[in-house]
Amino acid sequence: MSAIARRGFLAVTGAAGVLWAWQAHAGAHEDFFTAIHRDDAAALQTLLRRGMDPHTRNDKGQTGLTLALQLGSLRAFAALLALPTLNVEVRNAHGESPLMMAALKGHLEAARSLIARGADVNKTGWTPLHYAASSHQAGQEDMVALLLEHHAYIDAASPNGSTPLMMSAQYGSIACTQRLLDEGADPMLKNQLGLRAIDFAARAQRPDTVTLLQLAMRQRQPQRGQW
């Protein structure tokens, strides 16, 4: 074989090798997210043993760990969390952490596990407590209590200054709103639009929550003045 022919052969075989590697990677990527959708921990563990990056994102920028929590694929979540090298703070394209998703979906034990692994309870901007307070899942007051036990800032301000109490007033359960108030959330605070939690409740047409917040505001009047 001439030198020119040899170079041509190597170029072709090299390109074929690159194509094969790309196809193998693409297949593993698809299999990784399929396993999460199916909550197939065994398939996921096999891919991870073969070197699959657990921090891989799908075409929407979602991470495997956060997606597992979003879907309720808790066996897949456990398989990923078992990796000692897993970074539990890897965010998705929207800046959401796994703990935020666990808080939103009401996965209390998953939230405990993430906190035990060092998940940030007080990240900048929207926090896990905002997400917990926004959810109407049964028992969300226990999720709120868990986060507060681990020093979540109760009046954390979102990028527009909204607090967890405001989110609960509009979207959460009245039990969650009550828990936040019992733990010291301030109903007198306003966001950047000048809205208080009671305004969020009124806008969402939640009269029971409005009544609850009116009582909390009256109780604070001697301390904070007129509203």
Image (spheres, rainbow, N blue to C red):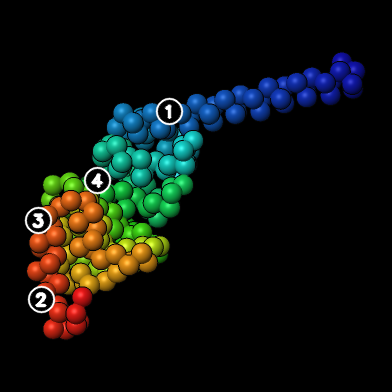
Per the image, the residue denoted by label 1 is 31
* Residue underneath mark 2: 219
Residue 14 x, y percent position in the rendering: 72, 26
Q: What label does residue 208 carry, if any?
A: 3
The crowding category of the residue bearing disc 4, from other C-alpha atoms within 10 Å (few below 14, some 14 to 19, many at least 20), is many
Q: Distance of mark 1 from mark 3, alpha carbons?
A: 47 Å
As helix, strand or loop, the secondary structure at mark 3 comes to helix
| Image location of residue 4, percent across then percent down | 89, 21
State the residue at coordinates (24%, 45%).
105
> On the rendered structure, is 183 left or right of 37?
left
- Separation of residues labelled 4 and 3 (CA atoms): 24 Å
Residue 167 in the image: state x and y as whole percent.
26, 57
Mark 1 vs mark 2: give the one in front: 2
Q: Secondary structure at mark 4?
A: helix
Amino acid at dot 3: Asp
Identify the element where label 2 is drawn: helix
The CA distance from mark 2 to mark 3 is 17 Å
Q: Along the line of sight, which residue is nearer the eye, 71 or 31?
A: 71
Q: Which of 178 and 107 lies nearest the eye of the viewer?
A: 178
Mark 1 or mark 4, which is nearer the start of the sequence? 1
Residue at left 50%, top 26%?
Answer: 27
Q: Is the residue marked by circle 1 packed among few (<14), some (14-19), or many (20+) residues within 10 Å? A: some
Note whether residue 103 is visible: no
**On the image, numbered disc 4 is attached to which residue?**
105
